[in-house]
Amino acid sequence: MSKRLGLDLSPLRTSRDYRLVFVGGSVSAFGSFITYVTIPYQVAKLTNDPLMVGLLGVCELVPLLVMAFVGGALADYLDRRLLVRGGEFALAALTGVLLFNALASRPHLWLLYLIAALAACVDGLQRPALEAMVPRLVEPEQLPAVMPLQSLSFQIAQLGGPALAGLLISAVDLSLVYAFDLVTFAVSLTCLTLVRAVPPPPDADRPSLRSVAAGLRYATSRPELLGTYLVDINAMFFGMPTALYPFLATQLGGPKILGLLYAAPSVGSLIATLTSGWTTRVHRHGLLVLLAAALWGLGILGVGLSGTLWLTLFCLAFAGAADMISGIFRSVMWNQTIPDHLRGRLAGIEMLSYTTGPLLGQLRSGLMARTRLGVTGSIWVGGALCMAGCAALAAALPQLVRYHGKDGLASKKAADEAWLAASAARPAGD
């Protein structure tokens, strides 16, 4: 593979703490994706209703709407490593509950919804701290290389986890599937324990409604940042049909196909990540975010219209590649431009943008599938609406289209210097 296209591995070579976070997060994510596939499958098996699967998204959405703001404020005030490690402990405990529920002679449906909601609460507390921590572990000029590495970790997990989940679900009891995820937390917790402390910025804002409001004001004052959030919400709301995968699998070949449907987007994402060297030389980040999101919608439209397994998998892989390119440029914009003292709160807002869309998208796809459109109609209509939404956002947000990465770096540097100067000027104890 050409060096111009290949991954830049320098952050892994130069930062011990980033290596630990990378390894621990990769293993934990692999197990979590197994559970991510297994819970909807278990709900579908118990209810045989696509809407009931889609309601999992509602259970996760409501806690996220609150806890992402709380987690973001805490990430700007406390040691970010401790928050991430505490979240891993909590998620491991919830996975243990899923294991015991699966062992019951009659598993409780309500418990699956409750665990989904509680896991969303923990994720809302943990994820902003993790995303705010990573930029502190590497040099600023290495951030464009870090984003593809983070994506590679995620995509390997998203590819291997669902594929293994499909095999396990068809071969063993669901309790053993959850048990596999539980084991992966031991690795992530060990790695996080070895990472050095990541203290908050000097003179950090105390968690409060006022500090949350300060983060929201900053986000809305930056149209290009606001645009990245809206583009992602649009793409995922209309073009995220994962709630329909158990039913699409039935049409295309049965439960053994389920893992392939979940894994196919990751194949495309992995290819895009491994050939992402070119992204470090592109500076029109906002324009690429829009174009890639529209291509995601095109891929989802193809999934709904294909009717055959091989073409469905190809379209999902194409969509996954486009989504990864959009995600890389969104992450670079976020991490190269947001001041460190606001990084946790803005990470909470970012989390809402990339989680509320998919969760609401599950509900949309489930509701639409109950109409005359059916499962495949719900998918292709969503893809078409995604592309239309991207065109509308491009027209409404010219600042996003014109955004240049060099301007973002200069803006962040000036904001960080101003914050440090103001902190040094404050009397002690203020």
Image (tube, helix red, strand yellow):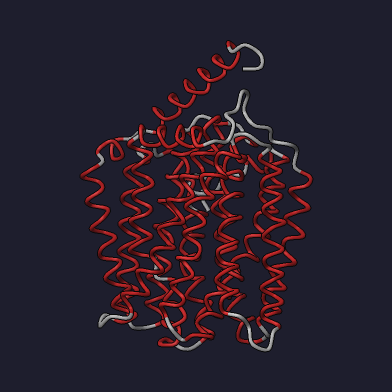
Q: Residue at x 66, y 17 (%)?
A: 429
**Quadrant housing the C terminus:** top right
Report the side of 11 relative to 354 (left or right): right
Residue 293 position in % (x across, y down): 34, 55
Can you say whether 178 is above or below 207 in the image?
A: below
Q: Residue 119 versus residue 144: which sits nearer the camera?
A: 119
Report the side of 322 relative to 167 (left or right): left
Q: Quadrant of residue 357?
A: bottom left
Report the side of 89 relative to 255 (left or right): right
Residue 287 position in % (x across, y down): 31, 43
Residue 200 position in % (x across, y down): 64, 31
Report the side of 329 relative to 300 (left or right): right
Residue 95 position in % (x across, y down): 68, 68
Can you say whether 408 is above or below 75 in the image?
A: above
Q: Residue at x 71, y 49 (%)?
A: 85
Q: Quadrant of residue 195?
A: top right
Q: Residue at x 43, y 57 (%)?
A: 356
Q: Residue 179 versus residue 212: which sits nearer the camera?
A: 212
